[in-house]
Amino acid sequence: MRKLKLIEKSYELINETVIKMPELPEITVIAKQMNEEIKGKRILDVEAKQPKNLNLPVKKFDSIIKGKTVSNVSSQGKWILLCALDFYGIRVC
């Protein structure tokens, strides 16, 4: 019981200080809008807000993704997926 209460309190605190996690339909709409706005544009810079989600060092991710062209933005669950093409047409998702 005590763990559940601590989790609930920390969740409330996070929601007060950080933007709430959007619901699934909102994620779909955001991904669609992003696809319309940035598809075909080149990635000039990146910022890793949660580097633990990358599963590789930030510098390596930075070197892989910079200079790529966005080929598609979509959603899968509550994740927004950005796919990019390099100069050779290789797709990175």
Image: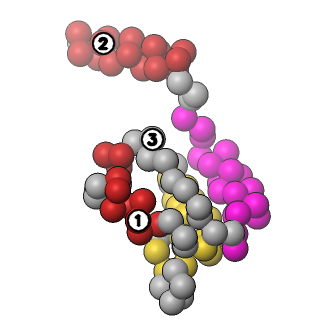
- Residue designated by label 1: 63
Residue 49 - label: 3
Dot 1 and dot 2 residues touching (CB under 8 Å): no
Work out whether residue 85 or residue 27 is closer to the camera in this orientation and state it: 85
Tag 2 secondary structure? helix
Is residue 11 positioned above or below 71 on the image?
A: above
- CA distance separating discs 1 and 3: 16 Å
The amino acid type of the residue labelled 3 equals Lys
Residue 93 in percent (x, y) is at 47, 70
Tag 1 secondary structure? helix
Tag 3 secondary structure? loop
Q: Main secondary structure of the magenta part?
A: helix
- Residue designated by label 2: 6
Q: Is residue 25 magenta?
A: yes
Side (left or right) of 2 relative to 29: left
Residues in magenta, as a range? 21-40
Q: Give whichever of discs 3 and 2 has the lower sequence position.
A: 2
Dot 2 surroundings within 10 Å: few (below 14), some, or many (20 or more)? few
Q: Residue at x 62, y 49 (%)?
A: 27
The outermost residue toward the left is 2
The outermost residue toward the bottom is 88
